[in-house]
Structures are given as structure tokens and as C-alpha cells.
Amino acid sequence: MRTIFISRNLNKESPLRKWAEASGWRVVGRSLISFAPLDFSPPGPEETDWWFFYSPRAVEFSADHLVSKPKQQSKSVKLGVLGAGTARALRGYSGQFEPDFVGEGSPAEVAVAFGKIAAGQRVFFPRARQSRLSVQSMLQDVITVQEAICYDNVAVPAEEPIAADVYVFTSPLNVAAYLDHQKLKAGARIIAIGPSTGEALAEYGVKYEMTEQPGEAWVVAMLL
């Protein structure tokens, strides 16, 4: 039986799980990262113009500070996100948020697009402890960067190699958590979700394919 590994814990509604079960594949879904919230103090609505979320996890571990603000205050701050998945997480968090900016493409492309609309403004980035700072580092001279570490993300390496015919990596830290400790099966197909994940694979010298857009449905489309 052919095996596909994805560096993400899969629920019963996972498009990839459903496809694998219907197609006679074995699927191994396992995140190689553990997450934990951290205490932090965000700037008040009078002290910042934007919040920018890098990932659904950033939404999960920080957006409560926006929910707790009075509506007139929370709505005075504009919201930016990196990627459609983060936009969905923000919309679904409390039912009251709609991103003002959704960045698509590589981090460099997102930084250029976001810089055009946020130039000269104050932008708060709630982020992971291990973050590439991919957007904010490119905008240091364009915006006033504010940041806080709102959650910890720690690699949990695989204790032994995972024998798969297809490997799907979902983040740069998942790439490092696997490749720093284990080898990929020779001849396996490697798929990256997101440009930064692809860049991480390239740094290890791994040849990979990238989904057209983030999301498991796009992985399935590549496998059909």
C-alpha cells in the first residue's frame, strides 16, 4: 500500500484523509511541532494601526485580545493576514472579524503589497517564538514594526524515519524537525504547502513541488 505523510494532525473531515481512504492510500498525519500559548501585552488600539497575523496559530493564540476590546476600539484597528488559511481562521474566530488585507504569494510579494497600503503606519505582529519574520523584516524601513511573541512553537522530531511515497510539509519548522534528524525515502515525491516551506526545503537541497495555493485540497489536486 502506498503511503503519504503530511506534517499536520488530520481530523475526520480532512480532504487528504478522505481522498487517501477512497484511493487505497495509507495516510500518516503528524505534526512535528508542539504549540503553547505565552503571556504577552499587545499595544492598545490608540497605539497601533494594524495587527498582522502570519498564521492560523497566531490568530488562535492572540486574537482573544481583540475580542476582549470594546467593539468600537477593536474595529478601529485594521487586520492583515498572510494567506487564505489565516484569513479563514480570523473570520471564524469570533464571527466579528474580516481581514482588511489578505496577502497571497511569496512572503516577498506579500511584503510589497502590504507595504503599499500600510506605509508609514504602525503594524503589530503577534508571532511565534521561532518565526522567520518573513514580512516584517522586509518592511522595517516602510512601517513601524511592533511585535510580541504570543506562542511557543517547539520542534518534536520524528524518532525514526517515516517511510512514505509522498511527503507533504506544511511549514519551515516542520521541515527542519524532520530533515535535521531523519532522511527522506529515496525516490519519494516531496510537496510543499506555501512558499516559505518550499524555501526551507530548498535550503536542505530537496527538490520539491509546491501546491498552487495553501490547503489540503490543492495537495489532492496534485495527486489525482
Image (cartoon, rainbow, N blue to C red):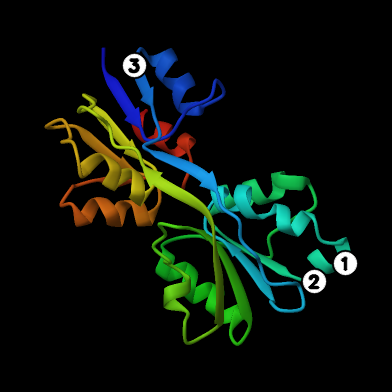
Element at label 3? loop
> In the structure shown, which secondary structural element does the residue marked by tag 1 occupy?
helix
- Name which residue lies at 19% across and 39% down: 181
Which of the numbered marks, if any, corresponds to residue 72? 1
Placement of the N terminus among the 4 image quadrants: top left
Seen as rendered, the residue at the extreme left is: 186
First along the sequence among labels 1 and 3: 3
Q: Amino acid at mark 1?
A: Gln
Q: Position of residue 89 (x, y in %)?
A: 63, 46
In the rendered structure, the answer to whether residue 23 lies left or right of residue 120 reads left
- The Cα–Cα distance between marks 1 and 2, rounded to whole angstroms, is 6 Å
Q: Quadrant of residue 129?
A: bottom left
Can residue 59 be seen here?
yes
Where does label 3 land, which residue? 25
Ranked by sequence position, the earlier of labels 3 and 2 is 3
Give the quadrant of residue 174.
Answer: top left
Amino acid at dot 3: Trp
Q: Residues within 10 Å of mark 3 (few under 14, many from 20)?
A: some
Residue 76 numbered mark, or none: 2
Q: Nearer the viewer, mark 1 or mark 3?
A: 1
Residue occupying image coordinates x 39% and y 62%:
132
